[in-house]
Amino acid sequence: MRLTLLSRLKDGDSRSVIQLAEGTGLTSQGIRKHLSVLESAGLVARESIGRESRFVYQPSAIEKAKQHLERASAQWDNAVARLKNLVEDE
């Protein structure tokens, strides 16, 4: 469900809980719980417009995770290459 919510928000437009709940089969309260988790993770931000809460996607959190994973992947690639060289030299 959380990936579905992020997909609906990825265009950058803010949406209300009611808009995000459409077609999901979940109640607004259920959607709010998922959005709360996404907000805690820094993946969405809440905007208050009058009495309505709207949510918008925050791509910076995903970018930070992507950069971290790319660095970790490069480190593992280097470690595997060193191990391969060590094993082949013996």
Image (cartoon, rainbow, N blue to C red):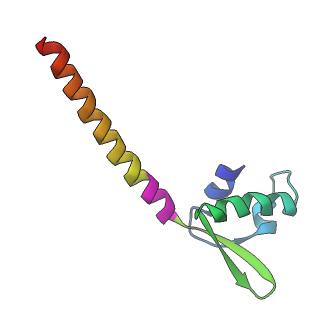
Q: Quadrant of residue 21?
A: bottom right
Residue closer to the observer: 89 or 11: 89
Residue located farthest toward the top when viewing the structure as drawn = 90
Query: For residue 41, which quarter of the picture?
Result: bottom right
Image: 54 above or below 20: below
* Residue shown at the point (56%, 69%) measured from the top left: 12
Q: Is residue 25 left or right of residue 49?
A: right
Q: Position of residue 77 (x, y in %)?
A: 28, 34
Is 63 situated left or right of 9 in this image? left
User: From the viewer's perspective, is 88 left or right of 11?
Assistant: left
**Percent of width and height locating residue 83:** 23, 23
Indicate the position of residue 49 as horizontal and vertical percent values: 73, 85
Residue 62 higher or lower than 82, as above or below: below
Left or right of residue 70, residue 42 in this image? right
Q: Is residue 87 magenta?
A: no
Residue drawn at the location 44% of the way across and 58% of the way down? 63
Above/below status of 52 relative to 71: below
Tell me the residue at 55%/67% (across/down). Answer: 58
Chief secondary structure of the magenta span? helix
Residue 10: percent from the left, percent from the top?
57, 61
* Image mark count: 0
Tell me the residue at 29%/40% (across/down): 75
Q: Quadrant of residue 29?
A: bottom right
Magenta stretch, residue numbers = 59-65
